[in-house]
Image (cartoon, grey):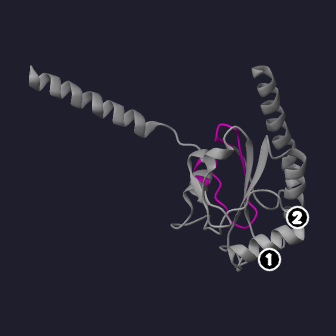
Amino acid sequence: MVVAAAAAAAAWLLLWAAACAQREQDFYEFKAVNIRGKLVSLEKYRGSVSLVVNVASECGFTDQHYRALQQLQRDLGPHHFNVLAFPCNQFGQQEPDSNKEIESFARRTYSVSFPMFSKIAVTGTGAHPAFKYLAQTSGKEPTWNFWKYLVAPDGKVVGAWDPTVSVEEVRPQITALVRKLILRKREDL
């Protein structure tokens, strides 16, 4: 009888472990170091729409994207929406500066008010786990600077675009998601 009880308990533990392992992960479960060196749980953005972008200061897309991203943040954020910027030096070595210099450049040149994170790798074996998740779930891995991933309030990736797709072209999908979020919050009142 003791053996049967132990076997049943072991079977239950195995089922529980399998259920936990199968629990689907989402973007907001990751942590990242912000541009000033503080570890941040992306959980703080859960419940908002996020546009996650790998940025670079010396890219041909820099001016157009930074201006449009800041305008989007100004128009829609920060209560229901945030641009989450992750500097990356993997493509053309176009983000060679330190985190302090990157932040200074973005704030001084574009008055950036959206959250910025420390420089990371977004592809390959050293890629940040959050970007591995974005690439895996969207089926689209960054091949250059300014890839954009749209993340819903529940942490699921709902869209991904390469840098040739402008922020203005993506704006309707972002606005629709934010509008849906606001309406849902109003209904909950």
Query: Is 116 left or right of 136, judged from the image as shown?
Result: right
**Where residue 49 sits: x, y (%)?**
75, 42
**Where residue 163 sits: x, y (%)?**
79, 61
Residue 95: say if magenta: no
Q: CA distance from mark 1 to mark 2?
A: 17 Å
Residue 149: say if magenta: yes
93 up-or-down from 47: above or below: below
Q: Which residue is mark 2?
A: 111
In-front residue for pair 148/130 = 130
In which quadrant will I find the N terminus?
A: top left
Q: Amino acid at mark 2?
A: Ser
Q: Amino acid at mark 1?
A: Glu
Residue interval drawn in magenta: 135-157
Question: Where on the picture, by quarter, is residue 43?
Answer: top right
Q: Mark 2 Cα within 10 Å, few/some/many (few <14, many 20+)?
A: some
Q: Which mark is residue 185?
A: none
Q: Mark 1 Cα within 10 Å, few/some/many (few <14, many 20+)?
A: some
